[in-house]
Amino acid sequence: MSGSVSASILPGGLSRPRFRRRFPRIHRSALWRRLFHWRQLDFEFASWQMLYLLVSPKRVYRNIYYHKQTKNQWARDDPAFIILQVAGIAVMAAAYSVVYGVGIHGFIKALVQLLLVNYFIFGILMATVTWFVANRFLRHQNVHVADQQVEWMYAFDVHCNSFFTFYVFAYVLQFFFLPVLMKTSWMSLFLGNTLFALAGSAYAFTTYLGFHAMPFLHHQESFLYTIPVIAMAYLVSLFGFNLSHHLIDFYF
């Protein structure tokens, strides 16, 4: 009796064996095998995905749908994309550290914040939330169709894709506009806050596209509801809150 009760509280009515199979052990062995065999990593394809996430993100998710049809899983089985992201974040942390002259200790502090906290810890949190919401509230309930679940690792992949678009606006473009952003003018406030608003909106929109690609989900537009909140916060910030200044002071 207690076993049936405990199983019933799992998200989406999942039984305990299925829950275990889908959450911590999704193609884990395949990822680790390829991580330690660099010749098997497809950095060219990962670079192609990064490019098209900026110019045509729908094309990336169409390709992921084909991947599902051929390999019967939504999530990546190649960690090349994550490796390139980690390298890119480390490069930007080093670049900012050189510009602000914070030394090796400042670089390590920035790397921990940008990579460990912003990318991995925030990513695990977002993947878990979106995975739970999608499985619990957004799945079609159709007795004539085989039951399908969102893989947790796919939710993390969606975060990685979304974070890349955020990274370009909030890390890379911010760096190249630093001579303007570090001034105390309203134009620097406007430019910096606009870049962060675009970064947050791009993250939300790419997340929406990631779950919109799954045909067994509905109401995926729920993931777009954060964009009006970002827009309102952005408009309020233009009255004097320079987000770039505050974040640079925090990180460096």
Image: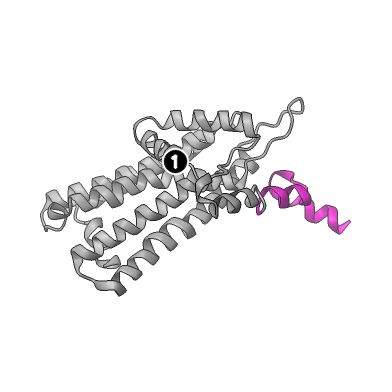
Residue 51 in view: yes
Task: Classify residue 46 as left or right of residue 100.
Answer: right
Task: Classify residue 138 as left or right of residue 161.
Answer: right
Q: Say which of 105 and 177 sits in front.
A: 105
- Which residue position is annotated with label 1? 46
Image quarter (top left, top right, bottom left or bottom right) of the C terminus: bottom left
Q: Say which of 207 and 63 sits in front.
A: 63
* Residue at (37% x, 40% y) in the render: 202
Please state the horizontal and vertical placement of residue 97, each as a whole percent of the image: 25, 65
* Residue at (29% x, 72% y) in the render: 104
Q: How many numbered marks, from 0 up?
A: 1
Please tell me whether residue 55 belongs to the stretch shown in magenta.
Answer: no
Instruction: Give residue 72's quadrant in the image.
Output: top right
Instruction: Read off the magenta span.
Output: 1-24
Residue 228 in view: no
Image quarter (top left, top right, bottom left or bottom right) of the N terminus: bottom right
Please tell me whether residue 2 belongs to the stretch shown in magenta.
Answer: yes
Q: Say which of 191 and 113 sits in front.
A: 113
Q: Could you tell me what secondary structure mostly forms the magenta stretch?
A: helix
Q: Is residue 156 above or below residue 217?
A: below
Q: Is residue 64 above or below residue 127?
A: above
Please state the horizontal and vertical placement of residue 139, each as a whole percent of the image: 64, 35
Q: How is the image coloured?
A: one colour
* Mark 1 residue type: Ala
Please state the horizontal and vertical placement of residue 230, each as a whole percent of the image: 35, 45
SS at mark 1 in the image: helix
Q: Which residue ends up furthest to the front in the rendered image? A: 39
Please state the horizontal and vertical placement of residue 81, each as a whole percent of the image: 46, 46
* Residue at (24% x, 47% y) in the render: 173
